[in-house]
Amino acid sequence: MKIETDQGIYGLGDATLNGRELAVESYLAEHVLPCLIGRDPFQTEDIWQYLYRGAYWRGGPVTMTAIGAVDVALWDIKGKALNTPVYHLLGGSSREGVLVYTHANGADISETLDSVRKHIDEGYLAVRAQSGVPGVASSYGVSKSGKPYEPAQRGLPSESLWSTEKYLNFVPTLFEKLRVELGPEVRLLHDCHHRLTPIEGARLGKSLEPYHLFWMEDPCPAELQEGFELIRQHTTTPIATGEIFNTVWDAHDLIRNQWIDYIRMAIVHGGGITHAKKTADFAALYHVRTGFHGATDLSPVSMAAALHVGMAIHNFGIQEHMPHSALTNEVFPHGYSFVNGYMHPGDGAGLGVNIDEVLAAKHPYQRAYLPIARKLDGTLTDW
Ligand code: KDG
Ligand code: MG
């Protein structure tokens, strides 16, 4: 999304909500953008409150993504108007670079090991490892025939079959092999993608302790925040969650009770930079660090926003980095860079990302859905 000012400066925001894109577009076009005409783009706080409180109906992914898109674009404008990178406006650099992790996956343990090794050779110091599970037709996070992993597909939602029993028996053998082969240094992460119950998450965390993961992500759905207390009581494996959260209130109990170690709310789905900064500051009081969502369904604009926040806040933990396709990078030329495991947002004014609208127009929107998952007996479960 692009917001233009009467001073000739424009800002970019990302309004992508994978699988529900047009709902956000409509919310923006019909309800938000008319309210922005004539406002001072420097008033990021007041505009945020105007869009959040002023709507009366608040929260939820559509609303908060729309607010996030506007907010990020306004911070871009502010940086450009003041001729400074956004991170300078958020506290300046608290570190030399932003530690990132990327995704490795394979059909089996040996392919996954090769994939992790490949990313270590590329310079990554942290890698998320997902593998096909024997007896499970399609596991979360495993790409088909070596293609980059992108879960949303054209047509109606695809269905995959899931077995928690097979998964729980398998995952410790994966990480045992990775540790034996790769040694103690590399940071290893794993995403359970909300598929377990709390006690199953507890069992997994406990069984992974010998392989000292950097984090176990989304062991179970987080609507019931106290479910994480149960996991926490049983394991020292660090816990990350929040990629589908939209406000700090979704994580309020998780944070203040120290049931999690990393908060993953996406900058754009959580109301933008203004709300991400407040969430991070609240989390800092409870030793919770950030691990902002950074999958490829979020654009380079979101990536840049996350890097600027990650540079500035004290309780930064790690940033997810799934490199975009060459075409996406061409549509969004950007100044951020990756060197030896760390990324830097660049020192251009604003976010440091631009858009080639002519090229973008050659690739019109096509509807796609995230998959759904069913247990072996047909019961719908969390994908
Ligand atoms: O659109 C859904 C993806 O963003 C999500 O499945 C990716 O879990 C994910 C992750 O950790 O990157
Ligand atoms: Mg995830």
Image (cartoon, rainbow, N blue to C red):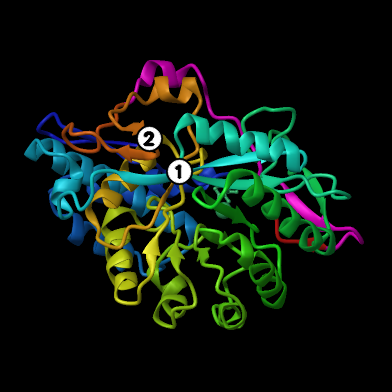
In this rendering, would 122 be left or right of 332?
Answer: right
Residue 352 placement, left or right of 27: left
Label 1 crowd bin: few (<14), some (14–19), many (20+), radius 10 Å: some
Horizontally, residue 137 falls left or right of residue 363, namely right
Which residue type carries mark 1?
A: Leu
Q: Main secondary structure of the magenta part?
A: loop
Q: Which mark is residue 340?
A: 2
**Residue 360 position by quadrant:** top left
State left or right for residue 72 relative to residue 191.
left
Q: Which residue is mark 1?
A: 125
Q: Position of residue 196 (x, y in %)?
A: 71, 67
Disc 2 + disc 1, Cβ < 8 Å = yes
How much space separates mark 2 and mark 1, taking CA atoms?
A: 8 Å
In the depicted structure, whether residue 94 falls above or below residue 368: below
* Quarter of the rendering occupied by the N terminus: top left
Question: In percent of the image, x 56 and y 79: which residue is there?
Answer: 232
Question: 155 or 164: which is nearer to us?
Answer: 164
Residue at point 39%, 50% (across, down): 268
In the rendered image of this protein, does residue 163 appear above or below residue 106?
Answer: below
- Residue 41 visible? The answer is no
Q: Which span of residues is magenta-colored? A: 355-379
Quick one: quadrant of the C terminus? bottom right
Q: Is residue 183 visible?
A: yes
